[in-house]
Amino acid sequence: MFLTPCDAASRVAERSPRLVAPADILCGGIRTVSLAAQLACCAFVAGGVLLPSAVHAQSDVSLPAVTVTADTAGPEELPGTFAGNQVANGARLGALGNLDVMDAPFNVTSYTAELIKNQAARTIGDVLANDPGVRFTTSSGHAYENFRIRGFDVGQNDLAINGMYGLMPIGHTPVEMFERVEVLKGPSALFSGMSPSGAVGGMVNLVPKRADDEPLSRVSLDYQSDS
C-alpha cells in the first residue's frame, strides 16, 4: 500500500500524543500538493518536529539556594630551605611559580635572609659574592655595583623585584628589605622578560619581605676597621 506524505503524517499524528496538530493543519487540508509541500511533510515526519503544545509546556521550577564561600587568598608561600636555612631549595620562576631547583630548566640559586643576617651583608653585592658564577666589574668603593654572570655583563638596572625591572635605586642596593636574593643563570627572558640592558648571562630577582601578623622590631650592631 502506498501512502502519500500527508497520509503518513496523519497516521503519525493519530498514534503519537506528541503531535497535537492533525495532518490537515500540517498539509493545509489539501490532498493533492506540490512536490515541495510533500517534501516538507516528509521532513516534518522524519525529523520528528514537535509543535508547541500544552503537553510540552514546562512549568516554572525553583532551584534550591546555592551558597558560595571562599577564603581570602594570602601571600604565596616561599619555597623551603636546605639544611642551615641559608640557601632555598626553590625559587620563583615567572609563570611557572615556585619551582624546586631540581625541576628548574636552568641553574638557579636562592639566598635567604638567614644568610644575609649571618654574614652581616649590607648590599646585594655582598650576597652575590657567595656565588662562584658571579664576578664584579666595579670595586667596593665604586658608586655602582656592576657584575658579570657567566662572563656577560649585568648592570644595576638588571636587578628585578618580584620579576619587575626599573624599581631598584641606582647605586648600592641595601638588603634589609629583601627575604630572598635569587640568581638565575642563563637566558631568562621567558620567565622575567628582557632586562633593560638585554643581559643574556642571567638575572637577579629580589623577593621583598612581608609584614607578619605580629609586630617585629630588630636591631643589629656591626663595626668596621680602617686598617
Image (spheres, helix red, strand yellow):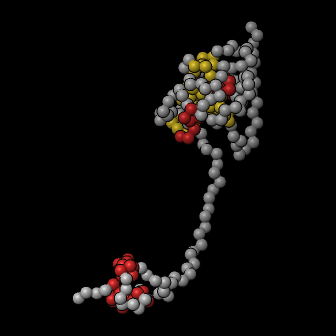
Coordinates of residue 217 in the picture (x, y in percent): 76, 36
Looking at the picture, does residue 17 appear above or below residue 160?
below
Q: Quadrant of residue 208?
A: top right
Coordinates of residue 10 in the picture (x, y in percent): 36, 89
Q: Is residue 103 left or right of residue 191?
A: left
Looking at the picture, does residue 25 appear above or below residue 218?
below
Q: Is residue 22 left or right of residue 201?
A: left
Q: Quadrant of residue 61?
A: bottom right
- Residue 24, can we see it? no
Task: Please give the name of the residue rendered at 72% of the width and 44% of the height, measured from the top-left corner.
Answer: 214
User: In terms of depth relative to the viewer, which is nearer, 13 or 86?
Assistant: 13
Q: Residue furthest top?
A: 227
Considering the image in quadrants, where does the C terminus appear? top right
Q: Residue furthest left?
A: 1
Task: Please give the name of the residue rendered at 59% of the width and 24% of the height, measured from the top-left corner.
Answer: 199
User: In terms of depth relative to the viewer, which is nearer, 213 or 29?
Assistant: 29
Q: How many marks?
A: 0
Coordinates of residue 88 in the picture (x, y in percent): 56, 32
Task: Please give the name of the residue rendered at 47% of the width and 35% of the height, measured from the top-left corner.
Answer: 103
Considering the image in quadrants, where does the N terminus appear? bottom left
Coordinates of residue 158 in the picture (x, y in percent): 65, 27
User: In terms of depth relative to the viewer, which is nearer, 215 or 12?
Assistant: 12
Task: Please give the name of the residue rendered at 61% of the width and 67% of the height, measured from the top-left corner.
Answer: 67
Looking at the picture, does residue 149 appear above or below residue 214?
above
- Residue 160, can we see it? yes
